[in-house]
Image (spheres, rainbow, N blue to C red):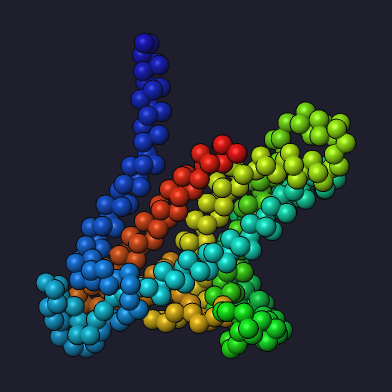
Amino acid sequence: MRLSDAFFRVIVTLFAALIPLSLLALLVFLVHDAWPAIRFNGVDFLFKNAWNLGNQYGNPVTVRGQQVMPGASFAILFLIVGTLASSLIALLIAVPLGVGAAVFLAEAVPARIRIYAALLVELLASVPSVVFGLWGYVVLIPFLSRHVYPHLARWLAHVPFFGPPSGSGYGLLTAGIVLALMCVPLIAANLREAIESTPQALREAGLAVGATRFEVVRKIVMPRLRLPLIGVSTLALGRALGETMAVLMVSGNALNILPQNVYSPISTMASFMVSQLDSALQDPTNMAVYGIAEIGLALLLLSLLVNALARALVPRGLGT
């Protein structure tokens, strides 16, 4: 092997190893910083609603071998529920809209303006999340609270989780809508490319046997999107799980309560870390900071689990 080939192989290997090494370093950092909180909280951290910094004016006490402020407790079931529920609502809204937008861009938009429409969608995908949050705070919340949620709660009063009270506009459904609007451009932009990569010969074959254009899309193009759809849905779910500022501005920032309906205020793991960091830094024992690190560790493990489940679905998609 020539020296240049060996050097190239080493460089490529280093770049390939950079991502897993970065992930491992992040995991080690979070475990190290969260370890005191893991020892203090135990399994209650995941199964109770009890986030309380304790009496910050008292003297630290020793509980389970850890120094904490009197009355301090750290448990995040309400954050797990808020994170998963808002992300699920976002996917339920974003996936159909994203698929529809991708099909429209690839099949219905005239060729002469298709590139500009696709560019607009890609630009929407790059809009900072805080802009979506500001729009949700200024426009969406007043509109939904006055003109949508009261009627929705009345019409769906007998449907579980959709009945009154309709709330103030801050809450689970609003957060899910904002997250969905952030995910739709991501889904549409990627699926459009997958649709356009469908071989022209397959389209022409479908038309040749008498299929309509709609039937070609439904029976030839759409089945080929199963695998790309799994991948892009995973990307969208990852963005929804980790979104911070937009959710913080529209979710209502609930503390230690589970949502009673889709209009209830919630908190998510990512947004809660930001909102509580300043208060946690005032804890002289640093246990609150360790607790936030444990939230970060739980969020990282949740994201890895979601990606693992998506990878597990890939062979099934390949076989269909």
On-image quarter of the C terminus: top right
Q: Residue at x 79, y 40 (%)?
A: 216
Viewer-nearest residue: 284 or 104: 104
Q: How far from the left and from the top, in percent, is residue 257? A: 42, 82
Q: In this view, does 85 lie above or below 205?
A: below
Q: How far from the left and from the top, in percent, is residue 210? A: 88, 36
In the figure, residue 181 lies in which quadrant?
bottom right
Q: Which residue is drawn at 46% across and 45% down?
A: 312
Q: Which residue is drawn at 60% across and 68% down?
A: 178
Q: Is residue 94 above or below residue 151?
A: above
Q: How far from the left and from the top, in percent, is residue 73? A: 26, 79
| 295 left or right, relative to 208 | left
Q: In this view, does 219 lie above or below 153?
A: above
Viewer-nearest residue: 7 or 262: 262
| 316 left or right, relative to 296 | right
Q: Is residue 279 visible?
A: no
Viewer-nearest residue: 244 or 2: 244
Q: How many marks?
A: 0
Q: How far from the left and from the top, in percent, is residue 95? A: 63, 57
On-image quarter of the N terminus: top left
Q: Which residue is drawn at 22% across and 85% down?
A: 71
| 4 left or right, relative to 245 | left
Q: Can residue 68 be seen in this view?
A: yes
